[in-house]
Image: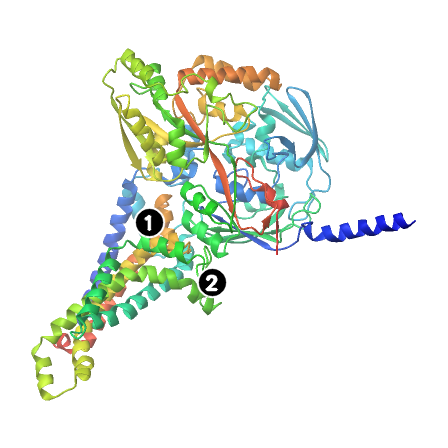
Amino acid sequence: MYGYILKRFISLVFVVLGVSIIIFFMVRLIPGSALEMYLGTQVEATPKQMEELKVIFGEDKPVLVLYGEWLSRIIRGDFGCSLRTSRPVLPDILSRLPLTLELSFFALCFSVLIGIPLGILSSRKQNPFMGLVIRISGLLGLSIPQFFLAILFVMFFSSFKGWIPMGTYISLLKNPILNLKMFFFPSLALGGGLAAVIMRFTRYNILEVTLMDYIRTARSKGVSEKNILIKHVLKNALLPVITVLGFNAGYLMGGAIVIEEVFALPGMGRLVLYAIYQRDYPLLQGIVLIITVFFVLINFFTDILYVYIDPRIRYE
Amino acid sequence: MKIFFILLISLALIVILLTPFASAESRGGNLIIGVDQEVIGLDPNVVTSFSSFRRIDLLYNKLVKMDYDFNIVPDLADSWEIPDSLTYIFHLKEGVKFHNGRELTADDVKFSLERVLDPKTASPGRSYIAPISDIEVINKYTIKIKLSSPLASFLSGLASNNCSIVPKEEVEKYGNLQRDAVGTGPFKLGEWVPDNYMKLVRNPDYFEKGFPYLDAVTFRVVPEQTSLLAGIKSGSLDMATINAGSIILQAQKDPNLVVMQIPGLNLRTFGFNNTREPFDDVRVRQAIALAIDRDEIVTAAEFGMAQPSGPLTASVKKWAKPLEELPFSKRNLKKARELLTEAGYPDGFSFNIVTSSSYEGGVAVAQVIQSQLKEIGLRPELEVVEWGIYIDRWVKRDFDSMVELRGGSAEPDRFLYRSLHSTGGVNNWLFEDEEVDKLLNEGRRLVKYEDRKPIYDKIQVLLSEKMPVIFLYVPFQTQVLSPNVKNFRQIGNGALQYLSQTWLEE
């Protein structure tokens, strides 16, 4: 078991390294530079001024050299400074991380609270019509783009005073009630799509497991339907759902970008969008690195959790 | 005697009855304004973005400023004399205090203007006041500025946010004022949480007595236009600048909101790279101009909320020639086709139009132009690129044609020189014409309106004949407010300086 964990951890490091290389080179392939964005179309700069500014923006060296410099600094914990604001990148990222984490966490909760019960309901043979309704709404939830859903929420619920506070962030510690109110609709918009995925997956697994021999055995032993559901079906059906959740949790952080834009929440998602628009390379690389680490860690822990819960795998 | 008492009592009654209708200003309150862009910095002499200027409107002052009618009026300078076209003497107001408590003197004006002129500062305002040859402090409140050549747009240049007056010791202490704002304006910098909000608090020592009424103005960053409107409806914002026509229409339909709209100062342009074939042939450019229908573009792209315009912003009636008087401004498809054939393109040709999906990029405008040009046999292709790539193409002059939104000015020299003089800093259409250059040089040297008007009239006609770029329209400047925001006034360039006279009704 411990050998497994160690092996997974090492591959983790390689993944993060690989992603950092890809992002570093890919983003510099996009036309447009931080310097050009800084000057925009309203400012006149002589060629000499452009040359001087290029040095400040670090654009005068070959890309490979720049990567080496960046890597050596990252290992020491120095994430560099933003090209636009000249402020250290790491504190800015870390200050906005809690918001995106909270948003993703609540979205995850919504997707589980909505997805699993609906998945169970839609798998019951007693009420096929309700099953159909739930499945169709699930399909809708999957198909509606998050952006569209978010804008719909904003348009229709803006008249609910105080439920969509635009552009503010009040931390959970300062004012829990306001904070929860604030996160309600954004988390719902973010978690909606995932809820549909969870629902369909839960339903599929339940139906699969119900056909298994050991369920038939339990029934013939005289165990009540309710106990069959809880003790045997759910435990086995929900296990794969954990993996799916772990996998999608990382993608939630990506969807958070759109939600944060529409609801004007100052989170990390918006920051990475801004970094791309402004070609703010140090900021972008810092954020991608942190997101990658999170994504990889979540999957790592999901794997460990899975191994721990499912005795069959443990003894393989 | 009786009549006297009757009159007295009637008068008293009238006063009592009318009092509730007199809307008195109420002091206090925090006005929350939604903006769609965060600012990078607040240093007035250095910043380039319009979003920064909006904060600087409230934090700093200049020697002179522009009022809502585009007139140059006193700001820090109480009065001035122009004894000859090369000399300006300004008399400063006394008792003006910086936010750090120190009184503003002529030394600060000298320091600030020299800072703007210093190439190391890379100030966008430098070209506005470049001909300054000497700045002399006569006494504590008097300063004399000499120019090396006459410049008609000098006062207008001094009214730009980039020429705000800053305190020397603070600039030296911090290196620059990007994060630490110390001005003379009606509001001081209170709290700034980047990409979240910026709170400006009332300056109790502001030199315009009685102002401001508000305790604070808070800028909140809300990137989406729909969300800005939702913010005002839900009460989390008191006002917002909205530029998406569809959202403005929604706001106008809502009886609980106030929509203020005036002609703006920005110009929407459709320009050519004048060095690329076939756009180096003036007949091709004229033909394209004749195929353009400005009204259709305004309806489709701006929901009707714009004014068709020629080379000078149509809203500045003092200078702009009416569009009907300019050649090639009226649609004439037959003549357009004739010109194309004359130039050697009877079957048309294909070319690219570079545009972006942001508001400035004007992709809707490009789409309408594309359909209009197809009617004379041309085959334009849209290249809709991401904003960063759009800027890259602009800087490298890598386009056949491009849709842009240019910042205009109420002073013709300030806009035309940098845009269309062969040495102009933002002349990315690569237009070079001796006649236009000569007239532009002359126009900025003369000082009297009566002398300059005929020259700029001639320039407008020439530019319409040579058509290096087609000037399309001036979008309206729109603010959406909640009804408890009182006494706000717009200026065509979007400046927020009248927030100093705004109050919030309870």
Is B275 above or below relative to B169?
above
Q: Which mark is residue A70?
A: 1
- Residue placed at 47% from the left, 57% from the top? A168
Describe residue B269's horizontal placement relative to residue B91 as left or right.
left
Q: Foreground: A277 or B132? A: A277
Residue assigned mark 2? A170
Q: In which quarter of the image is residue B448?
A: top right
The residue at 16%/86% (across/down) is A224
In the rendered structure, the answer to whether residue B393 lies left or right of residue A88 reads left
The reply to whether residue A1 is in sight is: no
Q: Residue B115 is drawn in which quadrant? A: top right
Q: Which residue lies furthest to the bottom in this view?
A: A222
Residue B271, image x and y in percent?
A: 37, 25
**Amino acid marked by disc 1:** Trp
Q: Is mark 2 on a helix, strand or loop?
A: loop
Amino acid found under the numbered disc labelled 2: Ile
Q: In this view, does B245 lie above or below A255?
A: above
Q: Which residue lies furthest to the top in this view?
A: B342
Give residue A183's quadrant in the image.
bottom left
Q: Nearer the viewer, mark 1 or mark 2?
A: 2
In this rendering, position of residue A50 left or right of residue B498 = left
